[in-house]
Every structure is written in structure tokens, then in C-alpha cells.
Image (cartoon, rainbow, N blue to C red):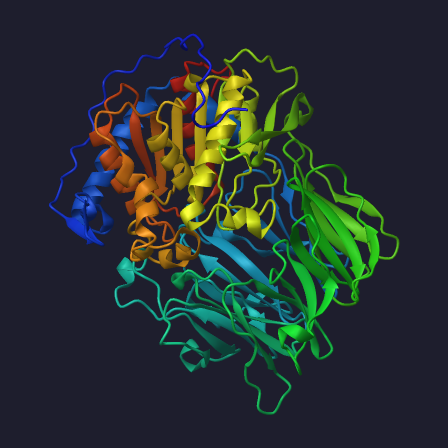
Amino acid sequence: MPTSDAPLVTVPPVPDTHADRPITYPVTRKSEQVDDYHGQCIEDPFRWLEDDTSAETTAWVVAQNEVTAGYLSEIPYRDALRARLTALVNYPRVSAPEVKGRWRLFAKNDGLQNQAVYYLQEGELGAPGVLLDPNAMSADGTTRVAGLTFDGTGTRIAYMISASGSDWQQIRVIDLATRQECDDRVDWVKVSGIAWSGDGFFYSRYPEPENTAAAYSSVNEDHQVFYHAMGTPQSADRLVYRDAANPQRFHHVVTTEDERFAILYISDRGKGKDGSAMYAMDLRAVDARFQPVWTEFDDDMSVLDNVGDDLLVVTNRAAPNRRVVRIALASPAESAWQTVIAERAEPLDGVTVAGGRIFASYLKDVTTRVSVLHLDGTVDREVALPGVGTAVGFGGEHHATEVFYTFTSFTSPASVYRYDIASGDSSPYSTVTLPFDPNQFETRQIFVTSKDGTRVPAFVVAKKGLVLDSNNPTLLYGYGGFNVALPPSFSALRVAFLEQGGVFVQANLRGGSEYGEEWHRAGMKAKKQNVFDDFTAVAEWLIENRYTCSARLAIQGGSNGGLLVGAIMTQRPELAGVALPAVGVLDMLRFHKFTIGWNWIADYGSSDDATEFPFLRGYSPLHNLADGVAYPATLITTADHDDRVVPAHSFKFAARLQEAHRGSAPVLIRIETQSGHGSSSLTKSINETADVFAFMFRQFGITPTLPPAP
């Protein structure tokens, strides 16, 4: 099998049927900024682009967008491609219902709505009625709603609202008897849930920024927990927990279903800790206060529910693939923990408790298997899933007799199933009718040997009967970080690429959770290079096995995946013909200086640490671009309201890339407005995908066969 040092297969060059005229890029001013990192001086001439509110940066954004828009507008099939994407995604999509008492809450998109609409239904036979329509909340459809949470009695629902793709949220509440919004408003919420307790709820927030105009890029510190009593102003909210001595910690509260216990989680990721401490408060106690259950920060702890005075907790403590333990709050010492579900060879991907059962989802080579167990851990049965793919859901109340889950794969759209707890039978609850035939495509799972001998899985999706002639347009996607797995998932937008003979490949790289915590740690900090080696190995396998050639290979990833693409571009600029880094973490020396970037130190390390600086400098995409190199055709995508990975990463990378690049391939940046870390509306998602696919097809020398645009 190939390694990153193996020679690539030589194939004839792809005919250039869309020769580009030379591009004149905007001139980007350079400053004399130099920083000293542990005795090593590093230039940062585009530092001024970090100020995304300045007039100079605004002018630079306008100039870059004009160049990119001009280039994209000359692609003759761009409009037809956008029309095809619009047609492909125009089908109803329904979520699994959440059941609370007599209510069923679900989301539905009729097809082309920018945001899904939330419906409330009384019982199974009641007529669903609109509860919340985010599309009516803004003219451009970029207002999003999330976190809908019933109170304990099922009489109110709290939810979060955000504007233009921002991570900042406001909490609002709806009275279900009247279907009217209450007057309550809670602002400056971030990294928070809504945990009802009696006539109010716990939530987490940051202090209001002194300069609200700069809130998108300012560092977020001093995360606090409050309790909001309904009918009172936010100024009267009770401070529940604050740790001013450790301003870069997250504090998050949940309550058990019976609202007896409030659970406080504390993480210290800014100091490189990749777990959470856990405290419990008995809300029925006269002197209710948080008591320590687990005070370390290196292991994950998550309460599933309480069983009387005890807590059911899922953890990776002494179990890299995770297990479920029962902790008696009267004696929470680790030595007294009772194992309910022992660690298995497969990683425990998700756990829920409903109807007196534990539903444990495992990953078997990145696809879902679900076991049903009694609360004491004895096995009840396995869930017979509709196929090989991804199943999520299985949540419900203590007295539930049925639960719902959603099943999907690369060729099967998300469909909702009902699971009867007593019989163990699954039955369709909500199926999907598509405006195309997904059966024309098939999925194959491959296993590739990485540079150090590690077996790395990937999924290959293409039309049936694919000819392996080294000439297929191929899109290789990856992420590889933060303990996030990439299981099979369905995308109607992706079909526009597949039906043109494209091959979509999803690589399951180290750094994710596909094979448990050990797989995650093998792609963290000083071992991050493993992620890039894994991705490179998959790319080389595709080339050696004649799926494609370098000229017709595109590499794509977003956020941490944008870092992946940036690193591959700099380490192996000849590997792919097209690079598509989206909202990427591209400046590895300063990522922790913005918003909640310090949170990523747990995965990346920090340039402030003399022992971690060298490996960050060694792969940081911004700092490894070299003058005179012919880089792949590149379309960088970011957005003005991304307050997670601030657009300065992409701005600085684009400026340096345009300066260093000496090839004829275009290197462009597309900067979306009124959007954030991911498209803030379906319309924006379609438009961005059309631009990305049009750019990719043009570099491949392919004119897609499409119906004419209306």
C-alpha cells in the first residue's frame, strides 16, 4: 500500500477546456509585525487583517470578493448547476419527534425553506400546528433556532435564537397553552443548554462585551452559570457558579428528568485538559449546593440519568472506548463505582435512557450498532436497523413505551423509525420521497495503510458501474480531530457531483472518535501529523487504484478539516489539483487569541508552550506556504459572522497564498456575508455549493451535463 513517500501513478494530463485568463489579485499591504516565540522570530505581515471591523479590512474583503465573483461569473454552467442543486434538495425533510407527555415536537422543511419549521402535535392523531417558524424572523432567512427544551410539566418550551450564523444566542420561552412567547429574554448566551428546574432554568453565559460591535472576534472569558426565574428580568437572575480565577473554563448545567439533581460540568480545555470535572446538587436538599463527584479534567463524564440517589454516568475513565457506571452520591469515590455496561472492543458512540432501558450505540468500522439493556446492564436485545449506516435518537421519558430514531446512509436519506420497547420491533414512522433515484449510486468501504502502518477506513460513493480509468473527478473529504467521527450521512447536494460521474470519498482519520479515545489521541497535539499522513494515504490509494489522478482530485474540509486541507496543500502541493479549505483554522500560532479558540488547546496544544510550539510551527498552514511554489487551484471559503473560527484565519492565509503562489491555477477566497461557521440558510448553502462545484469542475476541465437554468 502507498505511503506519503510513494511515487504517484503517471496519467495523461487533463485537457484544459476552460483556459483561464491571468488573474490580478488585490494588493495586500504588509506590515513589519514580528513576534518572538521562545527565541524564534516569526513574521506576521498580515496581522492587520485580524481586525475584521476596520475600514481597511472591509475594503480588502470587497476587493477579494469582486475578483472571486468575477472569476465565478465566467463559468458558463454555474447558474444551471445552482438550479440543479435547488431541484435536488427540494423534498420534504422531517425530524424524529421529541415526546413530552401528550406533546410531540418535531421539525420539518417542506423543501426549499431556509430554516426548518417547528411543529407541535397533541398525541399521535392530533393535527400538527406551527410552533416556531424561523423563516419569519428575518428577511433573509438567516435567523436560526435551536435547543428547544420542554419544562418539567410540558407547559412551556424554551429555545435559543441566533442571527446571521453567530454562535451568540438569546433564550426565549413559549407558553404552550396560548402558543404565545413570554416576555422573558436572556442574552449573551454561548456554550449553553437550557436546564429546567421548577419555574425557571439554568443556563450559561458570558458577560456582555464592552464593545458589542467587536463581539464576533473578542476573546470569550468568564463563563458563568445563572438561574432565571420565569417572569423576572435577566438582571434579577441568580448567579449559580463562577470561577473568576480560571476565566477560560466552560461551565455547563443539566438537570435530571425528575429535576431532582442539577449536574455541573467544568472543562479546562484552555489548559490542555480534554475532559470534564463533575459536580451534583440535590435540588430537594435544604442546603442545596454543588458537591464534587469527579474533580479531575482529563476524562469525560456525562450523566445519563439518576436511579434514585445514584447517577448513571458514561465515561472514558479507565475505558478508552467508554463504559457506563453507577455512582452513589453518598460515596462517589472511583473505587466504589459500579460498572453497568463494560467497555467493549467497539467504541460506545452514544447512550440514552428511556422507558426503563439503556440504548447503547456502538461504532463497528464507523457504522452504527445499537444494544438495548436493562438499567442494571443486562442485555435485552439488539435493534434490527434498516441497513448499514448511521442511527441516532432513541431518547424518551421514563415511562415511554416507544422511542424514535433516524437512520441514514450515503445513499439513503434520513428516515424516521419507531421502536417498540416491549416487542423490540422497528417500523417506519416518516419516510422520504426524493426527486432523484439514489439507487443509481453505491457505497464501498475501503481500508488504507497509513505511513506508520495504521489501518485507516474510508467510504467511496459513486455511480454503479464506475470505470477505474484514473480519470474520474474525485472529491476527498476529511476532518480528523476533536473526537468527532464521520459516519455515513446523506446529502442531496452531493448528488449534483455524483451524477456527473464524480466519486465522493469520506476518510475516517485519526483524531476522530471512530475507534475510541486512543484513535482520538493518536491525532492530537504532537501526533497531529498522523491525521495528515492518513489523508495523504487515502489520496494516494485512490490514485494508485485508478479511481482518479492528481489533476482530477479535489480535497475538502471545514473548520478543523480546513486546517487539514491547508496542511496537505503545504506539505504535498502536487497531490491534488483542487483545494477547498472552508472556515479553516489556518494560523496555528494565534488561534487561541480569538473568541473561544483557547478551547482548542486541548486538541492542538499552544504556541505559548515552548514544548508545543515546534510541532505547531511545523505544520501551521499559514506559516508553511513557500514562495515560488505552484499550489493547487484553491477556493477558500469563510464568512463575516464566523465567531468560532474567525475569518482572519482565512484572510491571512489567502493573502499569503496569493503572494507565494507561482502557478497558473487560481487561488481565490469567497467571503460570505450574514453567515457564520457554516451556511446560515439553505439559500446560502446552495449558492456556496454551486460556486464550489463550478470552481472544481472548471479546474477538472469538465463541462457538466445539466438541464438549462430557468
Is residue 26 shown left or right of residue 174? left
Residue found at x 55% / y 23%: 503
Work out which residue is located at the far right of the displayed protein and give it.
423
Which one is nearer the viewer's eye here, 562 or 200? 562
Q: Does 695 sit above or below residue 182?
A: above
What residue is shown at x 50% (from left), y 35% (from top)?
A: 452
Give the x, y percent position of residue 320.
61, 55
In the rendered image of this protein, does residue 282 appear above or below residue 442?
Answer: below
Q: Which residue lies furthest to the bottom in this view?
A: 286
Left or right: residue 629 versus residue 438 is left
Q: In which quarter of the image is residue 7?
A: top left
Where residue 209 appears, as percent x and y from the top left, is 30, 67
Q: Which quarter of the figure is the N terminus placed in?
A: top right
Q: Position of residue 339 (x, y in %)?
A: 72, 66
Residue at the (63%, 58%) spot, across then down: 319
> What residue do we see at 20% from left, 31% from top?
659
Name, please, the residue furthest toward the front. Answer: 452
Q: In this view, does 382 lie to the left or right of 449?
A: right
Point out residue 336 in the picture as x, y percentages from the top left corner: 68, 75
